[in-house]
Image: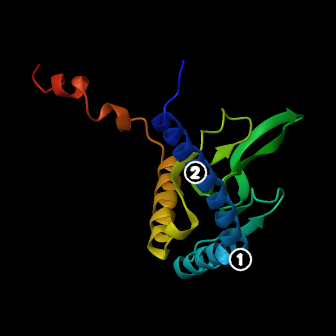
Amino acid sequence: MTFNETDYQNFQRKVERYQEVLKNTEEYRKVWQKGLKKEIVGLLQKAAAFANLPCTVEDRSDIKNLEAVVLSLGSARSGLGEPVGDGLHRDLIKQNGSLVYQQLFNGKILVLINYPYIEKYGQPQQPKTLAIYRPGELKEPYFIRHLESFITEIANWEDYDDDRPDDNQRIGFKLNFEQEGN
């Protein structure tokens, strides 16, 4: 088997791409540390204050280069109680949801929504990924859109209603054939 020069050039281009990706990771991490993290905290606090949204914005730095900024609606009594005997009830706690800007292993930023959940009442819903950005792509209008999506998702969760069709059922064969008079 003989390799020609074109085969080696293709391989060389792939190696150069790989090296570029590694360099980008280092650059993205530097941008996060030099100020993007603080900028995200500031923008979230500003928007929350403007809208009178009771929340906390915190910097989670447990693992270097896997840090996160979390806007949390906190936790509260759910209004549900678990009987513990002798007419006593233990309050079940509800986590009210959060919007997360998580630095990924490659320095890009994952934006996701953690839905509310009530302890001992079903399983928490899977987080919803809004987007993944290179640090330079995150601009102020995106934060507003993320916050709007977040608050819409949380309000929909709180206002759960099984009378409304599931999003997956709004379009499809079932809807087309279920007409009045049939």
Residue 39: give x, y in percent of width and height: 63, 77
Q: Earlier in the sequence, mark 2 or mark 1?
A: 2
Which mark is in front, 2 or 1? 2
Residue 82: give x, y in percent of width and height: 78, 37
Q: Nearer the viewer, residue 72 or 137?
A: 137
Q: Does residue 91 show up?
A: yes
> Where, quadrant-wise, is the N terminus in this rendering?
top right
Residue under label 2, please give it.
Answer: 16
Most extreme residue toward the left is: 181
Quarter of the view holding residue 125: top right
Above or below for 170 versus 19: above
> Where, quadrant-wise, is the C terminus in this rendering?
top left
Q: Are marks 2 and 1 in contact (CB under 8 Å)?
A: no
Q: Nearer the viewer, residue 182 or 8?
A: 8
Residue under label 1, please give it.
Answer: 34
Above or below for 175 versus 14: above
At 19% across and 24% down in the image, what residue appears? 178
At 58% across and 52% down in the image, what residue appears? 113
At 64% across and 79% down in the image, what residue appears? 42
Above or below for 169 versus 116: above
Instruction: Give the left or right position of residue 164, taking residue 35 as reference.
Output: left
Looking at the picture, which amino acid does disc 1 mark? Lys
Quarter of the view holding residue 58: bottom right
Above or below for 176 versus 133: above
Q: Which mark is residue 127?
A: none
